[in-house]
Amino acid sequence: MSRRVGVTITILIAANLLLAGYITVVRSRQPVTPPDTKQTEKKFLPRFQLFDDRGQTFQSEQLLGTPLFVQFINPDVQRHIDLLSAILKDRPKHDVRILLVTPNAQNLRVRVPSITDDITVVEKDFNLLRTVFEIPECCEKTIIFDKTGERLDHRFYYQGGALAQLHSLVDGKPGYSPALLQEAIASANSAQVEAIRQRTLTSPSGKAVIAMFSLIGSFCPSGELLDSLKAHQARLQDVEFLILFPKNFTSNDVQNLKTNLRVSIPVALADPELANVWETFQLRYGESPINGALVAIDRGNISVLQGVQQLDSFLTNTGNTNAKP
């Protein structure tokens, strides 16, 4: 083996070791999901004494009798405030008790003046309560208990979907469906969507696809969907494609996507009307069901697709292709 080959192999081995070390470090910083066996283990509301910010003392079991929503909330974090505001604006129809555990009750009440008297706000023993409710130091959670005190749901803020889950467990309201997003987009008066919709009325294929990504990369499922979009764009010359990012992205994010993932599909930021729909759905249902949603337009008719299979079905036997004879 020549010296050059030996050096090359050594460099590759070192690079792989560094990559493995990086992945290990990154994974170690992420919240760990318990094994499936532990996810089915029943948890109940702990028994302890509470001191609310109005000077009242009571036992945790006094909160039972109706479903209980517990929100560990930092008033300095906008995402926490947005969720509470959304819940207060759209509370379940059936009775539910709300317990807010915060490091600063006064600031919380200033930030959210609509907190009603039937909502319990607790500041005292905040760190102890984190331990009691199994809240890690890295990030806060929301928790839902049923009327008997059994824990039904617990999630980090970054996972989203707490509002929809609360409505589902308390009122039996259905969760996310593409039909809901379709209805919201169709009524949003988005100039961005309307311009494309109008063009499908006269284009040869009559079809267009708008892909909505708030998280995208070479990983699945977003990577698989992106590869499918790129393949269809290369094959079809009569179908309009557009990738949209939410409004908190920047022009640098757009350019990085196009450069790093070799994307020739037009990429833009969602206009304010569509961005508002996007934010509302992510707050209510979480990022997972919304990321990669496909707005499909066929001769002016709007629908929402999910995944590669539905995309392939929509574009089957469509328009002229770029393939050479």
Image (spheres, grey):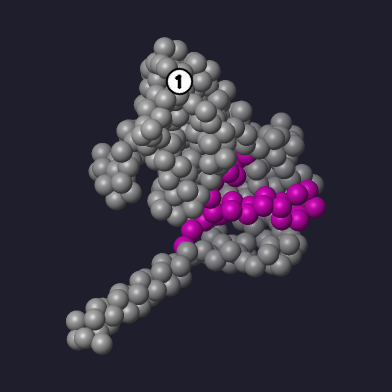
Q: Is residue 168 left or right of residue 138?
A: right
In the picture, residue 263 is in which quadrant? top left
What is the x, y in percent for residue 294? 50, 33
**Please, is residue 37 above or below residue 167 in the view?**
below
Q: Residues within 10 Å of mark 1 (few under 14, many from 20)?
A: many
Can residue 250 be seen from the camera position used here?
Answer: no
Magenta-colored span: 138-164
Residue placed farthest to the left in the image? 4
What is the x, y in percent for residue 34? 62, 66
The structure residue drawn at horizontal position 53% and vertical position 18%, both measured from the top left corner, is 301
Depth check: 304 or 40 in front? 304
The structure residue drawn at horizontal position 21% and vertical position 86%, both measured from the top left corner, is 2
Depth check: 96 or 59 in front? 96
Task: Provide the residue designation for mark 1.
Answer: 205
Locate the N terminus by quadrant: bottom left
Can residue 309 be seen from the camera position used here?
Answer: yes
In the picture, residue 269 is in which quadrant? top left
Depth check: 24 or 280 in front? 24
The structure residue drawn at horizontal position 54% and vertical position 54%, both measured from the top left corner, is 156
What is the x, y in percent for residue 15? 30, 75
What is the x, y in percent for residue 215? 43, 46
Q: Amino acid at mark 1?
A: Ser
